[in-house]
Amino acid sequence: MRLNEGAEEEKVMNKKIEMFARRFKRFMKSNKGIRFQKMEELKLKYMKEKDLIICYECKKLGYIKFDCPQWKKKGPTK
């Protein structure tokens, strides 16, 4: 009796996974999926551009002087 319940649960889980995969595939083919992919590409492009930013205070990549942890510790000088 216990083995049948486990096999039934596995079948139900497999059907749910298959249904999810079909819906996700359909979503990615739809207009919303295309917009989602474009947003991800833009985020990646932005991150690449952000990596090119160099802090003038500590000379590390990824942030500007105003966001620099060392500059914040020292405090802005005038």
Image (cartoon, rainbow, N blue to C red):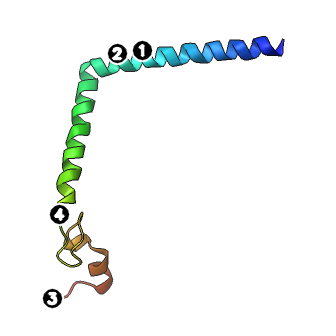
Q: Seen in the image, is 77 located left or right of residue 26?
A: left
Q: Residue at x 84, y 11 (%)?
A: 1
- Amino acid type for the residue under numbered disc 1: Arg
Vertical comparison of 19 with 50: above or below: above
Q: Earlier in the sequence, mark 4 or mark 1?
A: 1
- Amino acid type for the residue under numbered disc 2: Arg
Give the alpha-carbon distance from disc 4 to disc 3, as whole Å. Answer: 23 Å
Q: Seen in the image, is 2 located left or right of residue 74?
A: right
Graded by Cα atoms within 10 Å as few (under 14), some (14 to 19) or many (20 or more), the crowding at tag 1 reads few
Q: Which residue is mark 1?
A: 22
Q: Which residue is mark 4?
A: 53
Image marks 2 and 1: residues in contact by CB distance under 8 Å:
yes
Q: Which mark is residue 40?
A: none
Q: Which residue is mark 2?
A: 26
Q: Earlier in the sequence, mark 4 or mark 3?
A: 4
Q: Position of residue 51 (x, y in %)?
A: 22, 58
Graded by Cα atoms within 10 Å as few (under 14), some (14 to 19) or many (20 or more), the crowding at tag 3 reads few
Quadrant where the C terminus lies?
bottom left
Graded by Cα atoms within 10 Å as few (under 14), some (14 to 19) or many (20 or more), the crowding at tag 2 reads few
Q: Which residue is mark 3?
A: 78
Q: Seen in the image, is 28 located left or right of residue 38?
A: right
Q: Residue at x 23, y 21 (%)?
A: 31
Q: Position of residue 37 (x, y in %)?
A: 26, 31
- Amino acid type for the residue under numbered disc 4: Ile
Give the alpha-carbon distance from disc 2 to disc 3, as whole Å. Answer: 58 Å
Q: Position of residue 9 (x, y in %)?
A: 68, 16
- Amino acid type for the residue under numbered disc 3: Lys
Front of the two marks 2 and 4:
4
Q: Secondary structure at mark 2?
A: helix
